[in-house]
Amino acid sequence: METSTSAQWEKFFNRYYLGDILALANEYPERRSLFVDFVNIEKFDPDLAEELLEHPDRVLGVAEAALQNFDLPIDKTLSAAHLRIMDIPQKVNIRDLRSEHISKLIAIDGLVRMATEVRPRIRVAAFECGGCGETMFITQPSGRFIEPYICKNSDCGRKGPFKVNLTESEFIDAQKLRVQESPEDLRGGEQPQTLDINIEDDLAGIVSPGSRVITTGILRSYQRITREGKSTFFDIILNAVSIEMRDKEFKEIEITPEEENEITELSKDPEIYKMFVKSIAPSIYGYEEVKEALALQLMSGVPKNLPDGARIRGDVHVLLVGDPGIAKSQLLRYIVKLAPRGIYTSGRSSSAAGLTAAAVRDEFGDGRWTLEAGALVLADQGIAAVDEMDKMRTEDRSAIHEALEQQTVSIA
């Protein structure tokens, strides 16, 4: 297999993404990413596409260099531009990640459970020698800090001390996510598995807990450190190349002109109200009143902010009560799939923290306090379906009263 070259990528950009690069240049540096569909790389050169999947570090390095040095018709250089690969075929379930995937370009589908604050990460550290004042620049990989061993000035040669010059150093925005498998994709009594993801620069801060994302990135491994020293076991983390939102909030849904015309035509149908009701779980016979309530919940009302500062919510809560085996759970699962954002959970195994939120302090946030979102927070701006509420403990059930009425969650 031939190694990719800058000329090869320049040819690819000219053929498929010339207009996108020009648009990027006009908005640069506020916008710094070029999103490339993997299918186009495959059409251009199948060998190049295969090499990208197998050796992403080398290939992406060459590709980004070609993008940053692209010959533009305007007086501007894309010196900090990124190449974001989308829609790769190698999607892997989190629980199926194995050693064979390390250092490969993969995509995982999941639900963002936790997210740290966006903070600066030093990318290139400038060190000043305490002896001669020589400045040395060292690129810092994610996860560990590398210091110089010896002064590069041949007339000095001291082994320290070295001071970090923050003014001369280069920083980049960084964030860490914890993504878990979607609850509705699990079978039987399976517990959702999680994967931590590093995101940087313009990807940082674009997602929040509850977002369903497809993350393309390079799987890394790092050695566990125990009290006894270095372990033979390694943990894994994904360095994100691109993030794609799998679902949207209601207000984010874009309606095409064709869809708008179709909606307008449907609105003239005198039976449109019945059509809404019948379109909910059509495989379940009857229950017109229940389906009507669920349809009204999906549409919701209009929130009102009163002059005295009080707020009246516009959303409707629905409680389904009935004998076992009459499709209550199936209706809940259907509504969750129908809503742009939805979470299904069972009250039998849910705690107050699991339904609302909890403040946790662990290695995920590097010792800082972080919020772990529960089901109601994850379903923000969408539908939260809690099955078997009668199986919940009384104190856990009372913990959701604030979220139901005020639509807020307080953490003590």
Image (cartoon, rainbow, N blue to C red):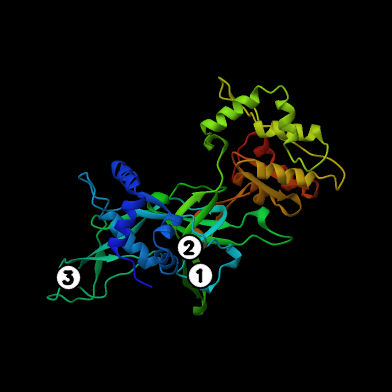
Q: Which residue corresponds to mark 1?
A: 101
Residue 238: mark = 2
Say what secondary structure mark 1 lies in.
helix
- Which residue is drawn at the image coordinates 29% and 41% (left, top)? 26
Few, some or many C-alpha atoms within 10 Å of disc 2 (few <14, some 14-19, many ≥20)? Answer: many
Choose the circle earlier in sequence order: 2 or 3: 3
Distance in Å between CA atoms under marks 1 and 2: 11 Å
- Which residue is drawn at the image coordinates 46% and 46% (left, top)? 206
User: In this rendering, which labeled residue sits more in front, label 2 or label 3?
Assistant: 2
Distance in Å between CA atoms under marks 1 and 3: 46 Å
Q: Could you tell whether 131 is left or right of 238 in the image?
A: left
Residue 127: mark = none
Q: Position of residue 221 (x, y in %)?
A: 47, 70
Say what secondary structure mark 3 lies in.
loop
Few, some or many C-alpha atoms within 10 Å of disc 3 (few <14, some 14-19, many ≥20)? Answer: some
Few, some or many C-alpha atoms within 10 Å of disc 1 (few <14, some 14-19, many ≥20)? Answer: some
Choose the circle earlier in sequence order: 1 or 2: 1
* Observer-nearest of 274 and 393: 274
* Observer-nearest of 92 and 298: 92
245 over 181 or under it: above or below: above
Q: Position of residue 385 (x, y in %)?
A: 70, 44
The kind of residue tagged 2 is Leu
Distance in Å between CA atoms under marks 2 and 3: 40 Å
User: In this rendering, which labeled residue sits more in front, label 1 or label 3?
Assistant: 1
Say what secondary structure mark 2 lies in.
strand
Q: Dividing the picture into quarters, in which one does residue 292 lie? A: top right
The answer to whether residue 399 shows anywhere in this view is no
* Observer-nearest of 122 and 52: 52
The kind of residue tagged 3 is Gly
Q: Which residue corresponds to mark 3?
A: 131
Q: Position of residue 338 (x, y in %)?
A: 66, 41
The kind of residue tagged 1 is His
